[in-house]
Image (cartoon, rainbow, N blue to C red):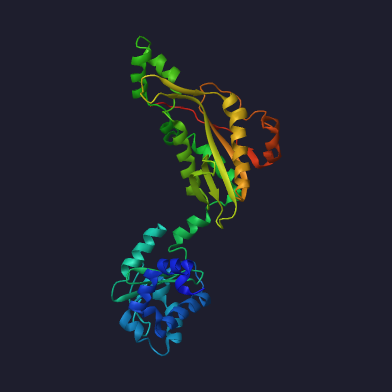
């Protein structure tokens, strides 16, 4: 097939159009002096290991007149006290330092990338060197290279993130966070709204008694609040791709889909709640859900049906989790008590081993506001 008729090749060219334009119109990174310095910087980093990131700035003019003994000068640069004690250095064509500073880089990875790109103006090329000898470079505000992290903070933050096989550990950490006031308060109707509700449904009731009896009331449609809160927590603490409300072929929706770093293994979490919410109008009580049949058997069947459908769609689904937020007024047993494969239709029981009910997330309004 001719390239002119190859749609895949055309799409590739379109995606790389800006990169191709930069390389052919500017051409700095195609010059032998650039390629030589790029290689020397990576070699020196491998030779002289350290744990921090470095930024090396050089003018395009100096880069294109790079000295003949750049290999010697690069080694001198990497062993100089000024280079070792400063995050940023500006060098000339002999790789001698003409300016330096030890200002911290932006902690956020994307903010750091944008900052480095801003330093790469019409006259300056910026080399960014990682502890693992990967070299990014910035030309005319554009970034290139193979590095993933731009700062030590970003690298450490990433390394502290949990992997997909540690999902249940992260969920247990979230369970603890739910006891923090700034977390749980967002789910419950505040006192001001409860007072309004009282004026509609029990105007003659004692206010304190009414507030105490109804402080368990959740906002309208609390499932959305629960789903977003746990989704954000997972995103902040795990090395996974987190997607919300994925549509299956039969138009059912997965609440939260998790994919590992490599994009191979898939997990999902179905979010349910039990308790009582306020009506959208705010002038009466809204929905009340109990464990039976809301969770056992309805939610169990729903999750296993999703697993079945995903397998039919050739998805590499590993486990389907059922997470229940328990905001019931009374202290009642876990909503998953006595769940077993017999709760499923016979044709789904063979998939029960892929289903997992997480212990309820108990949500209590300890100190109402």
Q: Quadrant of residue 173?
A: top right
In the picture shown, does residue 194 fall above or below 302? above
- Between 309 and 154, which is closer to the camera in this rendering? 309
Residue 343 lies, in percent from the top left, at: 67, 30
Left or right of 28: which side holds 263? right
| Nearer to the camera, 25 or 285 | 25
Q: Position of residue 257 (x, y in %)?
A: 53, 46
Q: Is residue 294 visible?
A: yes
Looking at the image, residue 128 lies above or below residue 320: below
Q: Residue furthest top?
A: 204
Instruction: Mark yes or no: residue 146 visible.
Output: no
The picture places residue 110, in percent across and down from the top left corner, at: 39, 59
Q: How many marks?
A: 0
Q: Position of residue 31 (x, y in %)?
A: 39, 83
Q: Is 53 placed left or right of 272 in the picture?
A: left
Horizontal relation, residue 89 to residue 254: left or right: left
Identify the residue at the far bottom of this view. Answer: 68
In the rendered image, the vertical position of residue 212 relative to residue 159, given as above or below: above
Q: Residue at x 47, y 80 (%)?
A: 39
Quadrant where the image shows the C terminus: top left
| Nearest to the observer: residue 69 or residue 80 | 69
Judged from this view, the residue extending furthest toward the left is 122
Q: Quadrant of residue 345?
A: top right
In-front residue for pair 204/104: 204
Q: Residue at x 45, y 86 (%)?
A: 72
């Amino acid at each position: 097939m001719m390239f002119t008729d190859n749609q895949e090749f055309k799409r590739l060219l379109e995606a790389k159009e800006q990169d191709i334009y930069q390389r052919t119109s500017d051409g700095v990174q195609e010059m032998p002096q650039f390629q030589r310095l790029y290689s020397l910087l990576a070699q020196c980093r491998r030779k002289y290991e350290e744990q921090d990131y470095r930024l090396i700035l050089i003018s395009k003019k100096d880069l294109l007149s790079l000295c003949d003994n750049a290999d010697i000068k690069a080694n001198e640069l990497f062993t100089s006290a000024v280079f070792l004690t400063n995050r940023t250095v500006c060098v000339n064509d002999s790789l001698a330092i003409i300016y330096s500073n030890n200002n911290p880089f932006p902690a956020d990875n994307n903010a750091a990338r944008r900052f480095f790109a801003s330093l790469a103006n019409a006259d300056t090329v910026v080399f960014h060197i990682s502890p693992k000898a990967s070299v990014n470079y910035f030309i005319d505000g554009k970034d290139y290279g193979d590095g993933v992290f731009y700062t030590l903070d970003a690298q450490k933050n990433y390394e502290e993130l949990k992997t997909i096989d540690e999902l249940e550990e992260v969920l247990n950490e979230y369970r603890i966070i739910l006891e923090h006031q700034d977390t749980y308060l967002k789910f419950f109707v505040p006192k001001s709204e409860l007072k309004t509700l009282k004026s509609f449904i029990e105007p003659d009731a004692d206010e304190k008694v009414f507030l105490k009896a109804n402080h368990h009331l959740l906002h309208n449609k609390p499932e959305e609040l629960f789903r977003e809160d746990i989704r954000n927590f997972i995103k902040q603490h795990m090395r996974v791709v987190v997607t919300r409300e994925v549509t299956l072929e039969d138009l059912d929706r997965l609440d939260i889909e998790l994919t590992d770093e490599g994009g191979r293994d898939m997990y999902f979490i179905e979010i349910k709640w039990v308790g009582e919410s306020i009506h959208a109008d705010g002038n009466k009580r809204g929905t009340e859900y109990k464990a039976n049949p809301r969770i056992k058997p309805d939610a169990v069947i729903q999750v296993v049906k999703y697993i079945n459908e995903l397998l039919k769609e050739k998805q590499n689904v590993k486990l389907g989790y059922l997470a229940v937020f328990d905001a019931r007024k009374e202290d009642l047993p876990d909503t998953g008590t006595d769940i077993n494969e017999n709760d499923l239709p016979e044709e789904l029981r063979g998939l029960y081993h892929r289903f997992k009910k997480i212990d309820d997330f108990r949500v209590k309004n300890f100190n109402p506001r």
